[in-house]
Image (tube, rainbow, N blue to C red):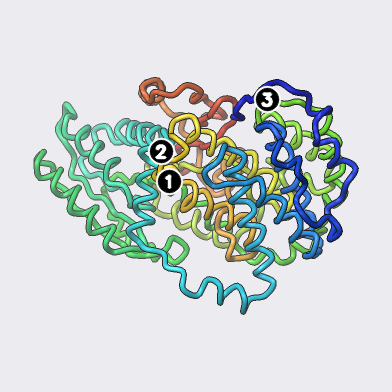
Amino acid sequence: MFQEEGSSSVTSSPLQLFSMMSLSPSIGSPYPWLRELKSEERGLYLIQLLLTCANHVAAGSLENANIALEQISLLSSPDGDTMQRIAAYFTEALADRILKAWPGLHKALNATRITLISEEILVQKLFFELLPFLKVSLVLTNQAIIEAMEGEKMVHIIDLNAAEPVQWVALIQALSARPEGPPHLRITGVHQQKEVLDQMAYRLSEEAEKLDIPFQFNPVVSRLDDLNFEKLRVKTGEALAISSVLQLHSLLASDDELLRKRSPLATKNLNGVHLSRVLQMNQSTLGELLEKDLASRHSQSPDSTSSSPTSLSGSAKMDSFLNALWGLTPKLMIITEQDSNHNGSTLMERLLEALYSYAALFDCLESTMPRTSLERLKVEKMLFGEEIKNIIACEGAERKERHEKLEKWIQRLDLGGFGNVPLSYYGMLQARQLLQGFGCDGYKIKEENGCVVICRQDRTLFSVSAWRCKK
């Protein structure tokens, strides 16, 4: 991940000076040696500054947080190496969290901010095209549906985020080639924007007509948490499949004020532990460094139980939604989620986990796209950057990006009345062929508890799982 710029020992570098200093108002002007740091040293130093800043933010020590932010700004850059880019977005997120303490100021600074629907759609398409994760999800989902719907004459698919017609175009083409002939296909698309659903309806109807498949598209303009299940128009006698891609985690958003009252500074003394270990290590990648950080933190932090796979965060909204899905008695439900733990109750917990997982995502783009690429910058800023900001700066119902690990989804769905359906060998074979043809090493998929996780190197980033109602 880091650019090698010559070998050196971290313990003999200017980073040693940092171990004898604390960020305080007396520091003043930038240290001249900051400019001389090599790439790896700069990365380690940025990690430590982010941890220091997060501790100051959590403690309400705004003056020290401001000094840390100023130091980070000297070294971070949205068009630099991986760690510089990550630091730029985490810095923005921490600053945004501080500003939320003054709602008037925060609203004033964001009063003229314009979010174009067309830009949001574009960045989602770029993520789909530039990285292989959603393509793998598409292949596994479609194959699972084809196998589950074998012999069915009436097929209904509910897409809980109907933004990408490519997936269903591919399914229509596959169903048209069935030996027994194509079924009558109905797709219900759920999305907040009518324009997106109109485009989806046009594209799919065009494909179905070309292939002479009886087809209907049912658009439902709605947010997921406001969904009226009657509008899905599920009918007796049709075989139902439900697809959810990167959607369900948002239903975990709730008023978690009580959780935040647990000790927001549970890791307040951890910064010194991180620092001494950073100075003793000469790691070659950010991933290796953070992996050791997280392993140590979970063994030392009194709050570590909140990250345990056996600890489920309660959400009445999620329970109600899963119960409603179960009530539709789908023959198959396929869920794709980001396989990360970004739903911790403390700021430091979420920051460490987010650093680790987004480091891998930024590294994916670093390995395939030039640093000057406008498409890369859009994905990093408008997608990853906004997710990071939500994870770090927001609390309560406003914090929608509550990604959780596959173990928790398995528990939650099991409690919701769903049983796991193992994804087929043929689906796995297609997914592996797709990754091999992607043109970049380091991606792989593996089976885990009857589900599939998509990895970059040894870091799991997304999961795909299939479910059916228990009898």
Q: CA distance from mark 2 to mark 1?
A: 8 Å
Where, by quadrant of the figure, is residue 219 drawn? bottom left
From the top left corner, tell me how far across and down residue 242 is, in percent.
Answer: 38, 47
Rendered residue at 87%/50% (across/down) = 22
Earlier sequence position, callout 1 versus callout 3: 1
Determine which quarter of the picture holds residue 60. bottom right
Determine crowd level at label 3: few under 14, some 14-19, many 20+ residues with C-alpha closer than 10 A. few
Picture disc at residue 284: 3
Mark 2 vs 3, N-terminal side:
2
Q: Which residue is mark 2?
A: 134
Near-viewer residue (292 or 271): 271
Amino acid on which disc 1 is placed: Val
- SS type, badge 2: helix
Taking depth in this image into account, of 337 and 132 the one nearest to the observer is: 132
Residue 245's disc is 1
Outermost bottom residue: 104
Mark 2 or 3: in front is 3
Question: What's under tag 2, amino acid-wise?
Answer: Leu
- State how far apart marks 1 and 3 are (Cα): 34 Å
| Marks 2 and 1 close (CB-CB < 8 Å) | yes
Eye-nearest disc, 2 or 1 = 2
**Distance Cα–Cα, label 2 vs label 3:** 29 Å
Label 1: how many Cα within 10 Å (few below 14, some 14–19, many 20+): some
| 406 lies left or right of 234 | right
Position of residue 321 measured from the top left corner of the image (x, y, whole percent): 49, 58
Q: Amino acid at mark 3?
A: Ser
Name the one closer to the observer, 258 or 87.
Answer: 87
